[in-house]
Structures are given as C-alpha cells and as structure tokens.
Image (spheres, rainbow, N blue to C red):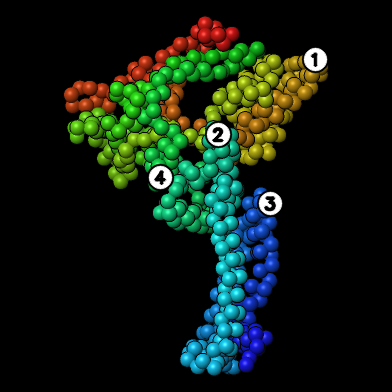
Amino acid sequence: MKSLTDIVTAFAKGITHSRVSLLGAMIVTVVFPFLLGAILYDIIWHITNTYVAAFIYMMLGPAFIGGLIMVFLGLFFFKGKEEVRLFTLEYLRDYFTDPSKFNKLRKLVFFAVFLTCVNIFIMGLLAYRGYHYMESNAFCGQFCHTVMIPEYTAYQNSPHSRVGCVDCHIGSGADWFVKSKISGARQLLAVALDTYPRPIQVPVHGLRPASDTCEECHRPEKFSGNRLAVIDKFEEDEANTHVKNVLLMKIGSAGDRTTSPHGIHWHVAKENRITYKSAGWDRTVIPEVTMHRADGTKIVYRTPDAEEVLAAAGNDVHERTMDCIDCHNRPTHIYLPADKAIDRKILEGHIPQELPYIKKKAMEVVQGDFASHAEARSAIATELNTWYKKNYPDLIAANPALLERAIAGVQAAYVENVFPDMNLGWGTYTNHIAHTEDFDFTVGCLRCHNDMHEAETGEVISMDCNTCHTVLAEGEHKPEVLRKLGFY
C-alpha cells in the first residue's frame, strides 16, 4: 500500500515532468510566504502605503493564483513523457471501483483536500483584503497619482472628507460595483496610455442617482426651514478689513412635514419632478425646463432661442431629471476661486490679518502663471519677501514669523486649488450652488432662474433674488443684524 510519502513523491514527480507545472510551482513557492505574511500584516496592522498594497493585491495575488492554475494545467493537460498515473481519470476510476485499493485513494484525497483548503484560505484572505483595498480612499485617490491628486486633495479638505469615495461614486449593490470596475479598467488603461483628459471632464455622466447616494444621509423632504448664512470676506485695504454678507437662506423642504414643498428644496419634491435639456456635456446652457406635476400635467419653459440652441448642439443634447447634484455639483471636490481661498486662509488664521495689505498682495501673487507647484511656492515666497521687506522693513524685522506664516498660508491656498500638471487653474471648475456676482447665466441658479425661460401661458421662471434668500447685510463690517442677534 502506498504511503502518503509515495503520493507526495508522485505529485512532485508529476510537476517535474511538466514545464508548465514546474514554472507554476516555482511561482507559488516564491510568492506564497511573502503573500501570506503581507496579508496577515495588513489585517493586523494595516498597510498605509497604497503602492505597497497595490503590489500585494494587484501583482503578488494574481501571480499566486496564476501559479496554481499553471500547476493544475501542467498536471492534467501538459504532461511530459512519463505518465503521472496518480492524477489520471483512469487511475481514480480504478481505485473507486476496487474496494481493496480504496485505502490508497483516501490518502490521495486527504492530500488533495489539505492543499485545496490551504489554497482556499489564502485566496479567501486575498479576495477579502483585495476587495477592501480597491474600495479604499487611498486606492481611489492616490494610485493614479497625477490624475487623481487634485480630486483627492479637494476631497481631504471638504465637508465630506470622512465619507468614503465609493459611498458616493458607487454605493451599495453588485451591479454598480461591476459597472465601476469596468469603468475603472477603462480609466486605468487611459492612464497607462496617457490619453486621459487634462483637466478631468465634468460633470461625470453615468453616476449613480443622488437618491441612492446623497439621500442615504441627507433627507430633502425633512423640514429645514430658513437658515442664516454668514459669508466672511476681507477687503484689499491696508487693514484687510473683515466684512460680512448675511443672508437668510430659504432652505425650505421637499415635503413630508409641511403642507406642501417650498423654498429651495422644492426643486426635488416628488410632487414636482423637473427635467431639463442641456446643450452640451457640461450642463451650463439649459434652453428647456419641464415641470411634471403629480396629476400628470406638465409645463414646458423655453428660452426664445431654445430651438436654435438645441439644433446646434445636435447629438450633444442631454435630457436629465433634476436632483441634488444639479445644484450641489461639487459637494466634495471643491476648488475655491482665488479670493475665497485667500479669505478662508485669513479667517482660519493661516494668513495673519494684521499683516498690512496681505489680502491684496496675496491675490496678486497667486494668480501668476506657474508651471508647477514648486515654481509657484518659490515665486510666492520671493515676491512677498521682496515687497514686505521693501515697504514694511521695521515690521518684518520685528516679527519675521508673521511674514513666514503669511507665505505658508498663501502657498497652501494655491497648492490646494491649482494643479498645473492637470491644467486645473483658478475657476476651471464651476460650483453651481449659488451664482456669480456678475450674474453669469451659465453658472448656478441663473442657468434656469433668469426670466428668459417662458411657458406658453406666459409664465416665466423667476429671477427674483428673494425666491431663494433675503439679503440682510452686504459687505458690512460688524453688521447690525448680527449685533442684534448677539454675535457681538
């Protein structure tokens, strides 16, 4: 009766008589200890370097599985001159039908089961950790470094920085997971071939509906009422005067706890489904808006040149049902314009307000044409150092740390919002949550609320500012309304 040693010997002999199996066995032997150790380390202590994790799960893992497949194929389909009888169908049939030989077969079965269990254990760990790695924020934001670093930087500075990338971009469900991986494979190919757009084209079409992602946390139908919005700004004078705009935002509700939808969130009420047609990929030119009522009737609002604009767009006309993303189009990947970026750094204390004319000088230096972040940092430091040491030498000599802090803050404002490698400058991406001060009809609310979209009944989509908010103070230093509310 053959012993277990005989079976192992025959197995090894079979591998040596197949070049395919031999190569596969060599790969498995080399990869196995490193792969197992790395996976266990990742489970216990976590691997933070995304490129090390990529090497483990995207190179070692497939290599291990590929080696096992090669061993199998070599034993059964690419055998050498010597027959490996222990692994042929005839051998197994003979031992299953002959009771006297079954004891020999048991050892073979036990050995095969043992190897199978070991492989299943390793592949299970690999699949589990590999899945979580490819769903991680580090993989999404850092693996394709040049392409995604702007989005990842903006994400880390956003209100949603603790929400996983996949929670918004994919959500739950196997179908969207598969779609995302197919899309990811296409994007990875574009990165490998250097054919990706610079900057990334937005909006991203084909995202999961906001009702499946945003509304998992945010409920627009819950009553919200009005909200006080205080917008901090700094003037470009010597004192960098701190002024405020105060708005009473009519957030409203999409229904539920109110008698009817009202306010800003009226737009996403189920009773008033709104669709629109945009002329172009970017959804900035909207010639036609349709409101669908709950009773089945609808009202179509069109601009005077709607037919011409839509005809000129041809196949680039996109019809869409309005949801959260049409206004909150940059809920996470927020790139601030230069003035707001500098204002924020002053407000946060990263740029000292007491440094004379810092708002004015910062605005001048950050809007230069720089080829890289390194060039921008150097130019910002040089220009600010030169100007302040010339115009305020005593102040800088007495407090050099003041200028150092200002330079670091201005540099941070630039590198967090401008990325020359991706052709992403100030104002490249438009935020539609509000409107511009110059009333640009391709931005924000004014794409539709411009008094130009008219129905056959003569009704127009209003441009009245009081529809969405009431201005309580504008550009005031210590506004009276805030004093009355106890802010001062």
Query: Where on the picture, by quarter, is residue 82?
Result: bottom right
- Quarter of the picture containing the N terminus is bottom right
What residue does disc 3 label? 45
**Secondary structure type for disc 1:** helix
Q: Are marks 4 and 3 in contact (CB under 8 Å)?
A: no
* Above-or-below relation of 125 to 100: above
Q: Earlier in the sequence, mark 2 or mark 3?
A: 3
Residue drawn where x is 67% and y is 86% of the image? 5
Decide if residue 49 is in sight here: no
**Secondary structure type for disc 4:** loop
What residue does disc 1 label? 394
What residue does disc 2 label? 158
Of labels 4 and 3, the one closer to you: 3
Residue 122: mark in rendering: none
Q: Earlier in the sequence, mark 4 or mark 2?
A: 2
Of labels 1 and 3, the one closer to you: 3
